[in-house]
Amino acid sequence: MKKAIYPGSFDPVTFGHLDIIRRAAGLFDTLTVLVMINSAKRTLFSPDERVNMIRGLLTEFPNVDVKATDRLLVDYARENDINIVVRGLRTTTDFEYELQLAHIYKKENEGLETVFLATEMEYSYLSSTVVREFASYHGDISPFVPASLIPLIEEKYK
Ligand code: ADP
């Protein structure tokens, strides 16, 4: 059974993340979207909010679940018997960072393989930072996130 994990901050989840989730769900038997909790990082949404937002969007994917952890990814994977990490690639800047991460994961957990999915071209510019930036200026975020999330994001900048 091929069990994969897709970790990230997802603050908030975007069409770019959702595209990676949809494609990874088709490649592996199960996919866990893992909201990484980093108490040193200030986030717009709490871990529970991020989990619930993502969960609400994934009801049509029976092999995808959504979890949060404040543990190291390598330890979470080991404890849950998962040996594939999925990450998305947008740019060469992503690539440098992601390659470094993949090497660190391998060093810490030899059984863990990292698989990269190239972004759909239409989402190559899209990041959670772009969404937060636009929302903070009350810009139109409808090209970036599903309609159901827009009021939740706008509420944070009232
Ligand atoms: P992190 O803080 O771990 O980078 P993110 O939520 O920003 O978390 O991203 C999680 C993963 O999704 C990363 O591998 C990132 O490169 C990827 N990703 C983010 N946005 C996109 C996008 N528009 N297209 C493809 N992959 C993306």
Image (spheres, rainbow, N blue to C red):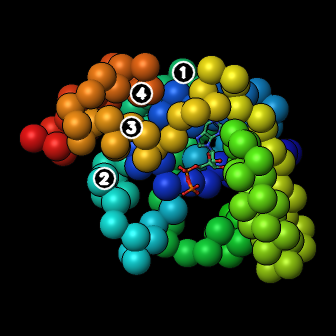
Q: Disc 4 versus disc 3: distance between alpha carbons?
A: 8 Å
Drawn side of residue 87 relative to residue 106, left or right? left
Residue in view at x 51 percent, y 62 percent: 36
Labelled pair 4, 3 in contact (Cβ < 8 Å)? yes
Helix, strand or loop status at disc 1: loop
Q: Nearer the viewer, residue 113 or 142?
A: 142
Tag 3, which secondary structure?
Answer: helix
Distance between the Cα atoms at labels 3 and 1?
A: 24 Å
Q: Are marks 2 and 4 in contact (CB under 8 Å)?
A: no
N-terminal-most mark, 2 or 3 = 2
Residue 33 vertical placement versus 82 (above, below): above
For label 3, the residue is 131
Of residue 45 and residue 97, the one placed in the foreground of this image is 97
Q: Relative to residue 48, is residue 102 drawn left or right? A: right
In front: label 4 or label 1 = 4
Dot 2 alpha-carbon crowd within 10 angstroms: few under 14, some 14 to 19, many 20 or more: some
Q: Which residue in the structure is indicated by mark 1?
A: 60
* Residue bearing the label numbered 4: 145
Q: Quadrant of the N terminus?
A: top right
Q: Residue furthest left?
A: 158
Please name the amino acid that badge 3 sits on: Val
Secondary element at tag 2 = loop
* Measured Cα–Cα span from mark 1 to mark 2: 24 Å
Q: Are marks 2 and 3 in contact (CB under 8 Å)?
A: no
Point out the frontmost of discs 3 and 1. 3
The residue located at (89%, 68%) in the rendering is: 111
